Structures are given as C-alpha cells and as structure tokens.
Amino acid sequence: MKQTMDKPKRSFRRRLKPIRRHLKPIRRHLSPIRSGDRIDYKNMSLISRFISEQGKILSGRVNRLTSKQQRLMTNAIKRARILSLLPFLYNEN
C-alpha cells in the first residue's frame, strides 16, 4: 500500500535580492605610500607612520593600505624590531 502526501509545489527559480540603491558610492582614498617609497625595514621614516604610540602595528583599515602593502609593512616592522631598529614596546616611563 502506497501512501501519497500532497506536497506543495516549489518553484525552482531563484529569488532575486532587491537592488539596494541607497548605498554610498565607494570613494578610493589616496594611498599614504607614495610611488617612490619602498617598504623596507631600513626606511624608518615610513615605518614610524604605521605604528601607534604604544608600538603596535596599525591595521590596514586605519592605514588605508592595500592588503599587499599591509603585509609588506608588517614584515618590515617585524624585521626592524628583530634587528633592534625599533623597540617592541614603547615604555611610558
């Protein structure tokens, strides 16, 4: 004996999301790193702009850096710390 249940028919069409027209257009900010600047552990004037007063590395969102630039900057800061060009922490004393 076979039981049949009435199932509601489903539409196989995708539901389209409504278009959001109220979003602000994305404004691209100028990069704080000029085209001539090299991200290098020896370039202390450049590196010091991307470190907080406590000695922490600022995030890429705060710095307005691309992900590649942020990665290179982080590696340069860490290398400068290891070579004692930068302190790991700034003491407030």
Image (cartoon, rainbow, N blue to C red):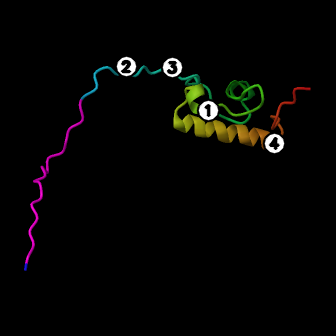
Q: Residues within 10 Å of mark 4 (few under 14, many from 20)?
A: few
Name the foreground residue: 50 vs 43.
Answer: 50
- Bounds of the magenta span? 2-18
Q: Residues within 10 Å of mark 3 (few under 14, many from 20)?
A: few
Q: Residue at x 81, y 38 (%)?
A: 88
Q: Which SS does the magenta portion mostly show?
A: loop
| Location of residue 21 by image quarter | top left
Rounded to the nearest whole Å, what is the CA distance between mark 2 and mark 1? Answer: 23 Å
Question: Which of the two marks, 3 or 1, is nearer to us in this view?
Answer: 1
Question: Percent position (x, y) of residue 15?
Answer: 19, 41
Q: In terms of secondary structure, where does tag 3 sit? A: loop
- Going by the numbered disc 3, the residue's amino acid type is Leu
Question: Which of the two marks, 4 or 2, is nearer to us in this view?
Answer: 2
Q: Which mark is residue 24?
A: 2
36 horizontally vs 14: left or right: right
Queried whether the magenta region covers residue 11, the answer comes back as: yes
Q: Residue at x 56, y 29 (%)?
A: 61
- Compared to residue 92, the image places residue 1 above or below, namely below
Q: Which mark is residue 83?
A: 4
Name the foreground residue: 12 vs 77.
Answer: 12
Q: In terms of secondary structure, where does tag 4 sit? A: loop
Name the foreground residue: 11 vs 32.
Answer: 11
| Location of residue 39 by image quarter | top right
Q: Residues within 10 Å of mark 2 (few under 14, many from 20)?
A: few
- Compared to residue 66, the image places residue 30 above or below, namely above
Question: Which of the two marks, 1 or 4, is nearer to us in this view?
Answer: 1
Q: Which residue is mark 1?
A: 59
